[in-house]
Amino acid sequence: MGVLDNKVAIVTGAGSGMGREEALLFAREGATVVATDINEAAVHNVVKEIEAEGGKGIAFAHNVASEEEWKRVVDAAVANSGKVDVLVNNAGISLATGLLETTIEQWNKVMNINLTSVFLGMKYVIPHMQANKGGSIVNISSIAGLTGSSGAGAYTASKGAVRMLTKAAAVDFGKDHIRVNSVHPGFIETPMSAEFVNNEQMLQWFLSQTALPRVGQASEVAQAVLFLASDAASYLTGIELPVDGGVTAK
């Protein structure tokens, strides 16, 4: 028996990295997973993995910055499964560019994918959760949403805004038994971070910042997301949960 039995969960950015691990873990725990990603081939492969393990999944190509695509995905999820119990706003991009070097086009792209997508996901999922008398939303931020991050002004701003948007939604929709929390990964080994993790100098810098002497794994972030999505976290809302090996403590 899984902790998400009979739940329907939308996971964005599910084609790789943390999103892939979240989708696979949720399916193993009994959820029907609506897996979305801008990379259609990748997300279809993830659903094939879910089905090969005996789980239930549906794949959608999804530009999370598009309002129309959010409407389509949520409507399809409800038409297929009748409800949405869990939303994981995982999709995001990084930008290691200094504030003065960031173009307005880069700024808008980061904000649209990292922040506006979270707003849109909640805007179109929450009414269905209200009708279902509850739900859990987990928004993936970053340790950059908790502390200043040098040389990444747009990224840091977007992740800090996700943290505060999460708290605002938690306050507004607690009365509807909808919980909204944020997860803040630290240095996690994913395809997005590969160029840094595989650089020995950068890796040693990462390790100098952590309390635990290693980088994290995407599967470890997925376990934290699963906890917040599940009924085990039934009295938690509006929190930020760092999964960072002790970076913010240090």
Image (spheres, rainbow, N blue to C red):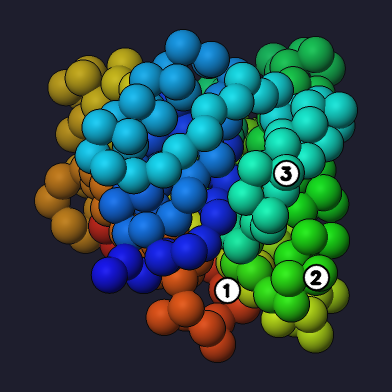
Residue drawn at x 16%, y 46% as measured from the top left:
214
Q: Is residue 15 above or below residue 161?
A: above
Is residue 174 or residue 184 the one in the foreground? 174
Residue 195, x across and y down, in percent: 31, 16
Can residue 227 be seen? yes
The quarter of the displayed image where residue 138 is located: bottom right
Residue drawn at x 73%, y 71% as measured from the top left:
132
Q: Residues within 10 Å of mark 2 (few under 14, many from 20)?
A: some
Q: Under tag 1, what secondary structure?
A: loop
Q: Earlier in the sequence, mark 1 or mark 3?
A: 3
Q: Which mark is residue 239?
A: 1
The alpha-carbon separation of the residues under discs 3 and 2 comes to 16 Å
Q: Is residue 5 above or below residue 25?
A: below
| Numbered disc in front, either 1 or 2 | 2
Can residue 90 be seen? no
Q: Earlier in the sequence, mark 1 or mark 2?
A: 2
**Is the C-beta separation of discs 1 and 2 under 8 Å?**
no
Q: Under tag 3, what secondary structure?
A: helix
Query: What residue is shown with label 2?
Result: 130
Q: Earlier in the sequence, mark 3 or mark 2?
A: 3
Residue drawn at x 61%, y 20% as measured from the top left:
61
The alpha-carbon separation of the residues under discs 1 and 3 comes to 31 Å
Q: Residues within 10 Å of mark 3 (few under 14, many from 20)?
A: few
| Numbered disc in front, either 1 or 3 | 3
Q: Is residue 246 left or right of residue 146?
A: left
Q: Which mark is residue 111?
A: none
Query: What residue is shown with label 3?
Result: 79
